[in-house]
Image (tube, rainbow, N blue to C red):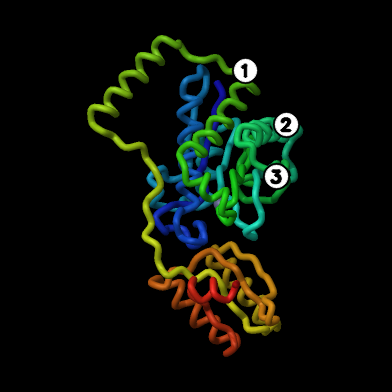
Amino acid sequence: MLKISWDAGHAGFGVTPGKRALDNSMYEWDFNDGVVDYAMEALSHYENVEQLRVDDPSGRVDVPLTERANRVNQWGAHLHISVHGNAAAPSANGIETFVHPSASALNRDIALHIHNYVVNRTNRRNRGLKEADFQILRATNADSLLIEGGFMTNTEELALMKTNQYRATVGRAIADAIVTKFNLKRKNQYRATVGRAFADTIVTKFNLKRKNQAVIQPTNIIRYIDTGGYAGPALLEIHNYLVKTGHNYDTKRGRDGSILFLIGPFDTGMANYREATASISKFDSNMRILTREQAAEWRQ
Ligand SMILES: [Zn+2]
């Protein structure tokens, strides 16, 4: 029996700060969830596989990493797969997969096999198999890997990541890689066909809608902190603040010499916006938080 545990990174519905597309049009969890869902569904048709999902499948609770790892370990998984969407500068794109620096040769071999399947099926850029001391990789006893299935910060990849088709491609690629790696045998085809036909009938009859990303109303997202050229210790404080509040960010220097933090969104209606505004004005009076419109203008 092969025991595979899964976790879709973070949670949806605005539960996890940051962790969404910069234009607020998709939570990272929606992508992660879709991929995990398709992968688990695909593997459910194979014999001698047991699967467990350790995040909250409803997306309402961001199960802490310690607890995710505990679930994996208590259940005694052989293989743990964590699915994420990436974020960086807008030009960054492609697929990368991580193993812990102390991962065994077998763990690396499995991860590379899965990674290559995902790259080949999606035809996205191969960023390679990498090492990182991520908590979920460090704390799980199973062979474990973390797949970043595309960049939410890249316009082209974000568009793909919003579709069920791309999520299915990634999820099924992971599943097929596991099938070939562990030489899994498909369950009785006839029963599976009857079962799926039955399920399809129910879907049609009751007009069921495939689970999909929550629709997020566009709001006045704050995407940039403009430091107005200030480059003192406050930059470190901003860094610490953004990390503490769970934001991914990148920095660049503007044409006027100002330093710009490109960050995962603040929502103007939310507490973190007010907190950020207060923190930033404390650093330096020249710093401003820009609205999306102002930032777009600034970037022209
Ligand atoms: Zn993530």
Q: Quadrant of residue 89?
A: bottom right
Answer above or below: position of 95 versus 193.
below
Q: Position of residue 93 (x, y in %)?
A: 65, 50
Q: Quadrant of residue 202?
A: top left
In this rendering, would 126 be left or right of 53?
right
Gap between marks 2 and 1 measured at Cα: 15 Å
Determine whether the residue tagged by mark 3 lies in a helix, strand or loop: loop
Amino acid carrying mark 3 in the image: His
Q: Residues within 10 Å of mark 1 (few under 14, many from 20)?
A: few
Gap between marks 2 and 3 measured at Cα: 13 Å
In this rendered view, identify the residue nearer to me: 298 or 249: 298
Answer above or below: position of 293 versus 55.
below
Labels 2 and 1: the sequence-earlier one: 2
Amino acid carrying mark 2 in the image: Asp
In this rendered view, identify the residue nearer to me: 237 or 96: 96
Per the image, the residue denoted by label 2 is 109
- Between label 2 and label 3, give the one nearer the viewer: 2
Q: Give the residue displayed 56% in from the left and 24% down from the top.
A: 2
Labels 3 and 1: the sequence-earlier one: 3
In this rendered view, identify the residue nearer to me: 54 or 199: 199
Residue farthest along the left direction in this orientation: 206
Per the image, the residue denoted by label 3 is 100
Residue farthest along the bottom direction in this orientation: 285
Q: Position of residue 296 (x, y in %)?
A: 54, 71
Determine whether the residue tagged by mark 2 lies in a helix, strand or loop: helix
Per the image, the residue denoted by label 1 is 183
Residue 294 is marked as: none
In this rendered view, identify the residue nearer to me: 18 or 165: 165
Q: Give the residue displayed 52% in from the left and 23% down from the top.
A: 49
In this rendering, would 296 be left or right of 212?
right
Labels 2 and 3: the sequence-earlier one: 3
Q: Residues within 10 Å of mark 3 (few under 14, many from 20)?
A: many
